[in-house]
Image (tube, rainbow, N blue to C red):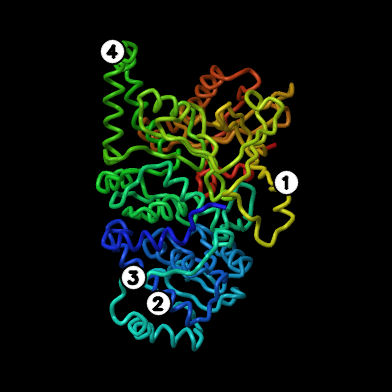
Amino acid sequence: MIQQNLIKFYEKSFSENWDLPSLSDYNGVSYTYGEVAKRVARLHLLYEGLGIKKGDKIAVFGKNSANWCISSMSVITYGAVVVPILADFKPDAAHSILNHSDAVMLLVDKQIMETLSESELKNITAILSVDDFGILSTKPSKAFMKTINNLDELFNEKYKDDFTREHIKYAEVDNSEVIQINYTSGTTGFSKGVVLTANSLAGNVDYAIRSIELNPGERMLSIIPLAHCYGFAFDFLFPLAVGVHVTILGKIPATPVILKAFSEIKPHLILFVPIFFEKLYKKKVLPTLQKGSMKVLTKIPGIKGLIYGAIRKKLYESFGGNYREAVLGGAALGAEAEEFFTKIRFPFTIGYGMTECGPLISYASCANSRRGSSGKILDIMELKIDSAEPYDVPGEILVKGEVLMEGYYKNEEATKEAIDADGWLHTGDLGVTDKDGFIYIKGRSKSMLLGSSGQNIYPEEIESKLINLPYISEAVVLMNKGHHLEALVFPDMEQVKAEGVADKLEAKMEENRKELNSHLAAYESVLKIHIHDKEFEKTPKRSIKRFLYKLEE
């Protein structure tokens, strides 16, 4: 069991950092740690008035915002179980999750609530707005109305008109107790509810505190979905445990808006998904490097160093020029982009995790990272590669330890399939390791393809090469009935229009295919590239839901 208690992190941080800025909406409201603590205390009084008990489930459903964070913090510090729901979930999925989770209360964006049917929510007895904490229930109970209407009076009576840091005292929640049920869309259809204990989240937060430098008063920009375990743990729980000021951007906007926010906030740590960095590499860096004069200059050792240094400085400044490292997670970074960022000594590192581990499995700082790896197994976890030669031959990545989930909510069969009798979580990912415990991911076991002569083919590796070719934004590599590979690609329409090649796109893709195959083994070669007319559907981690796509017969 992790020694640091999850809830005590926040009792301590809110008290010690009382006057420091805590949560801000980008170009919106801003709260100090003391103001967050006060709003959390008000919500606790509301829960008491509604008769909500320790261990009851409360769902938080909305876009990223300061109030979303306050809502979630109020649930876990009350001793209830938070059920975060991704804002992008469709109404049918949301109804299923709310009912399956046994949530008794819902805190939700007003706009999202307009898409839901209250009559379909079996156990929900109270609905509150995340926007302003007003009543959204169409038929609120008398207890709900009475508590809401008298909340100011109740608060003043309890705290004598002066809520101070000395009043911060949260529920006694042992780390062994369940604190969250997290539903993700996953890559194979409807999700399962991952049951996480306080120990799992405390393990993630404590490891981050020990491994990543962040200090009271420093800044972060929150971009990734907070309802996803990656965002919940590292854009929310971790920074608030150490007194950091988190500015929340909201839904992921266009690249220029993100870069503008970085330049204004000047964060000390960046957490993001690799696809953003791949786009930067492809759209900002590659066009510069591919100019005729630049190709010549980068072959001259001394000049090449100066050019790479200038590119590194420009990239660093574009992210605010104040951060120690960028931590990328949720998916793999394309090999070509990783090679370039490593070559110019850009301060980035790649982590690996799953919701089932709350989420972190492996990490190494940019100073200690190893090219091609997704970090080193956490010191509170164990790693095993299901292979006779784990250093050389890929096998399924198995992990167990402190941050492992309790199981899937009300799904014993799925839990047994995921966690074997010896306590190992079968991740479904394939990879190898080295003697120091660094993990090198090759792909998903479910997406691995078998070549005609029995070779293992990892489509993700081919796709990472494809998306760095001209006019390609996204790609999915599939196998046809003849055991040959073919690719579906969604074109980079911005580049297509800019260069006026819409009527030549088929020919350009054939050029890309030949260029791609020149860098692949014969058994990996792609027979044909098909143009897909719209973006591929993705998970919250921005992984393509490849199970949705097939080749036409």
What distance separates the C-alpha of mark 3 from that of mark 2? 28 Å
Kind of residue at badge 2: Gly
Q: Which residue appears at 57% of the width and 60% of the height?
A: 181
Dot 3, how many residues are within 10 Å of its Cα: few (below 14), some (14-19), or many (20+)? few
What distance separates the C-alpha of mark 3 from that of mark 4? 61 Å
Is label 1 in a helix, a strand or a loop?
Answer: loop
Q: Is residue 309 left or right of residue 146?
A: left
Outermost residue on the front side: it is 3
What distance separates the C-alpha of mark 2 from that of mark 1? 45 Å
Is label 3 in a helix, a strand or a loop?
Answer: helix
Q: Earlier in the sequence, mark 3 or mark 2?
A: 2
Residue hosting label 3: 166
- Residue 194 spot, x, y in % from top left: 61, 56
Q: Earlier in the sequence, mark 3 or mark 4?
A: 3
Q: Earlier in the sequence, mark 3 or mark 1?
A: 3
Residue hosting label 4: 302
Residue 535 marker = none
Can you tell which quarter of the image residue 226 is in? bottom left
What distance separates the C-alpha of mark 1 from that of mark 4? 55 Å
| Mark 3 or mark 1, whichever is nearer to me | 3
Kind of residue at badge 4: Gly
What distance separates the C-alpha of mark 4 from that of mark 2? 63 Å
Contact between marks 3 and 4 (CB within 8 A): the answer is: no
Q: Which residue appears at 28% of the width and 77% of the height?
A: 162
Q: Nearer the viewer, residue 449 or 413?
A: 413
Residue 420 marker = 1
Q: Nearer the viewer, residue 214 or 220?
A: 214
Q: Quadrant of the C terminus?
A: top right
- Residue 254 spot, x, y in % from top left: 36, 46
| Mark 2 or mark 1, whichever is nearer to me | 1
Q: Tell me if residue 470 can be seen.
A: no
